[in-house]
Image: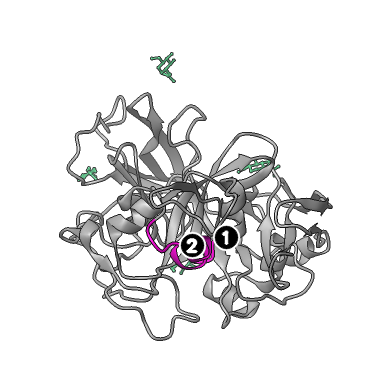
């Protein structure tokens, strides 16, 4: 399966200030499709779950499940998350003016905001003051009207939802002064080579405030294009709630097959039963025979016109499956761990207890897809030869003077 990847490491040079430069990975794009992506965001102050969600205009449930936080915790939306907590923010990544980005976030200015404080503090360095200025045609950044609504362009990449031919979702990560590429690779269970390929880097050098794309192994869905949750992709170790809060889909830890079942949120849902069977989404039956184990599985197949689509699939497997395993949930964090440098995000607050909550089902069933073929990163060596660093120079805050773009085949892999 050929994987086209073109990324540009872009150097921004602001001539109106002292020479400041920061790099960010840009993915050129041509069509109007979009994908799920994540932002690595560090809280600038204590904020309620609902406040963080509203800052990025996302569903609080999506924020919680993306971070494997237990949504059955009482009044979880009003739980106060501590300053400096690192969160993954799920966003939709679009193609705008030929570049992947998200522009669905609007920010209403408050007294004493400046473009710099909005960019560096409130949005954690995911955007620059200059990008906000440009996106909103702000003439004089020193005069911001209170209550003014500003579009906040945020960085994201899709790279076709794959990394080395395996499903992946991309996290836009703002490099901190303490970070090294080795540390980031270790933290996200990837390799330096893979990070360098993805970001078209020529060296392992990174600087604080650079924004790099980090591929996270994920479970991909296979919903039809006309499903409203087409393209759903869930990172390993987390959940997503879809189909108007009716279905929950989890990924990992044992394999990267998306596992969907009814969500136990108090909402009214259309039928989740597979046609011509008494199985519900996520249920399966097994029948041991001489040739192996016949597994009949009721899959969730997307939300179409407000209806939960299901398919019944039957496969013959060498062995009957054990119970479905689920990624562990954590309690809503109250404190930030001291050593966040290499700790998995969010800061480890896990109490290890999971089941018995409304999110975690007791037993489940077997994923229907064949397991993925090998560890991500195994093909990095092959891919590295084809990758090249491409730079784009910006000599004024607003204009790209030079943009050298190259697109190339990074790898040819088969599942
Ligand atoms: C994108 O990924 C899909 C599978 O997810 C694959 O079939 C397709 O060939 C890929 N396209 C490119 C351009 O790599
Ligand atoms: C998924 O996450 C689990 C637990 O964190 C880990 O053991 C497993 O290796 C991961 N799988 C992949 C393919 O990254
Ligand atoms: C089917 O799934 C539902 C919801 O997850 C569960 O309550 C039920 O026990 C399952 N039934 C069987 C036969 O596995
Ligand atoms: C969804 O509804 C519209 C209008 O109600 C209909 O034209 C379309 O065929 C439906 N799509 C599917 C996949 O059923």
Q: Are marks 2 and 1 in contact (CB under 8 Å)?
A: yes
- SS at circle 2: loop
- Tell me if residue 137 comes above or below residue 340 in the rendering: above
Q: Position of residue 231 (x, y in %)?
A: 50, 40
The quarter of the picture where residue 30 lies is: top right
Q: Is mark 2 within 8 Å of ligand 2?
A: no
Residue 114, magenta (yes or no): yes
Towards the viewer: 3 or 401? 401
Of 361 and 218, which appears nearest the observer? 218
Binning the other alpha carbons within 10 Å of mark 1 as few (below 14), some (14 to 19) or many (20 upward) gives some
In the picture provided, is 157 more to the left or to the right than 353?
Answer: right
Residue 355 spot, x, y in % from top left: 22, 62
Residue stretch in magenta? 110-127
Q: Position of residue 350 (x, y in %)?
A: 30, 74
Please rate how many residues cluster around mark 2, counting C-alpha atoms within 10 Å: few if below 14, some from 14 to 19, many from 20.
some
Determine the image quadrant of residue 81: bottom left
Tag in front: 2 or 1: 2
Find numbered disc 1 in the image and state the secondary structure of the residue it sits on.
helix
Residue 129, which numbered label?
1
**Most foreground residue, 233 or 336:** 336
Of 196 and 58, which appears nearest the observer?
58
Residue 318 visible: no
Q: Which residue is mark 2?
A: 114
Quarter of the figure that contains the N terminus: top right
Where ligand 4 lies, by quadrant? top left
């Amino acid at each position: 399966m050929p994987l086209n990847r073109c990324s540009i490491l872009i150097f921004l040079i602001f001539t109106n200030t002292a020479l400041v430069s920061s790099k960010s990975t840009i993915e050129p794009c041509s069509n109007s499709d979009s994908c799920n992506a994540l932002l690595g965001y560090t809280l600038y102050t204590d904020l309620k779950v609902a406040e963080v969600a509203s800052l990025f205009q996302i569903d609080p449930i999506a924020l919680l499940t993306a971070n494997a936080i237990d949504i059955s915790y009482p009044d979880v939306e009003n739980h106060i998350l501590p300053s400096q907590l690192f969160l993954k923010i799920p966003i939709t990544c679009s193609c705008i003016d030929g570049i992947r980005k998200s522009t669905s976030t609007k920010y209403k200015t408050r007294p004493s905001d400046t473009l710099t404080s909005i960019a560096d503090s409130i949005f954690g360095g995911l955007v620059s003051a200059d990008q906000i200025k440009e996106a909103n045609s702000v003439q004089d950044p020193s005069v911001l009207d209170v209550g003014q609504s500003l579009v906040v362009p945020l960085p994201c990449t899709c790279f076709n939802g794959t990394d080395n031919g395996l499903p992946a979702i991309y996290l836009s990560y703002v490099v901190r002064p303490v970070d090294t590429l080795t540390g980031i690779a270790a933290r996200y269970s990837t390799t330096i080579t893979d990070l360098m390929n993805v970001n078209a880097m020529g060296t392992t050098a990174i600087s604080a405030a650079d924004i790099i794309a980090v591929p996270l192994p994920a479970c991909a869905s296979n919903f039809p294009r006309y499903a409203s949750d087409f393209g759903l992709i869930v990172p390993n170790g987390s959940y997503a709630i879809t189909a108007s809060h009716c279905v929950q889909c989890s990924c990992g830890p044992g394999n990267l097959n998306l596992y969907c079942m009814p969500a136990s949120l108090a909402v009214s849902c259309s039928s989740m039963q597979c046609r011509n069977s008494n199985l519900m989404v996520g249920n399966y039956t097994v029948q041991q025979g001489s040739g192996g184990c016949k597994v009949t599985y009721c899959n969730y197949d997307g939300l179409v016109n407000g209806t939960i689509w299901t398919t019944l699939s039957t496969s013959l497997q060498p062995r009957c499956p054990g119970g479905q395993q689920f990624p562990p949930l954590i309690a809503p964090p109250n404190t930030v761990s001291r050593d966040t440098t290499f700790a998995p995000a969010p800061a480890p607050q896990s109490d290890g207890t999971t089941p018995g909550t409304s999110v975690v089902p007791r037993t489940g069933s077997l994923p229907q897809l064949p397991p993925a073929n090998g560890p991500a990163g195994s093909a990095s060596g092959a891919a590295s030869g084809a990758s090249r660093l491409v730079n784009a120079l910006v000599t004024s805050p607003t204009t790209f003077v030079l943009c050298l773009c190259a697109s190339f085949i990074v790898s040819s892999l088969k599942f």
